[in-house]
Amino acid sequence: MQLSVNVSLPNILSLISQMSLDELETIKDKIVEKKIYFQTFKKDKLSNIMDDFQKENYTDGFLDDLENGLKKSSVFRAN
């Protein structure tokens, strides 16, 4: 089972400020263990993404719209 909760940054900071040093150390250890600090998005080639969608038999119109949208997206426009 997976649970997802939206929590605002001010609420997170408020909760952190109420924690003991041992609790903060535990959180720090988990962040390091799970390598969730400074993770960067790994962009795939547009052709690989399109190939994956083509294999799922999406319509040509959808595929064209998807490709055009991805080409205009900030992820693919960024260096």
Image (cartoon, rainbow, N blue to C red):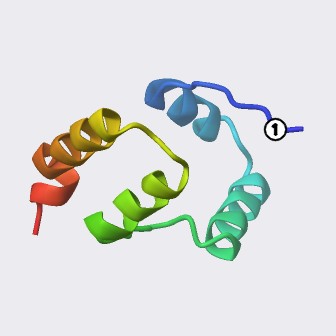
Amino acid type, label 1:
Gln
Of residues 48 and 54, the one drawn nearer to the viewer in this rendering: 54
Residue 74 lies, in percent from the top left, at: 15, 48
- Residue at 56% x, 33% y is 12
The quadrant the C terminus occupies is: bottom left
Residue 11 lies, in percent from the top left, at: 54, 25
Of residues 68 and 22, the one drawn nearer to the viewer in this rendering: 68
The quadrant the N terminus occupies is: top right
- Residue at 61% x, 40% y is 16
The answer to whether residue 65 is above or below residue 44 is: above
Left or right: 2, with 63 as reference point: right
Residue highlighted by disc 1: 2
Determine if residue 43 is in view: no
- Residue at 23% x, 36% y is 65
Residue 61 lies, in percent from the top left, at: 28, 34
Name the residue at the right extreme: 1
The image quadrant of residue 29 is bottom right
The image quadrant of residue 28 is bottom right
- Element on which disc 1 rests: loop
The answer to whether residue 48 is above or below residue 18 is: below
Q: How many marks?
A: 1
Of residues 11 and 66, the one drawn nearer to the viewer in this rendering: 66
The answer to whether residue 18 is above or below residue 46 is: above
Left or right: 10, with 22 as reference point: left
Callout 1 crowding tier (Cα within 10 Å): few <14, some 14–19, many ≥20: few
Determine if residue 31 is in view: yes
Of residues 37 and 43, the one drawn nearer to the viewer in this rendering: 43
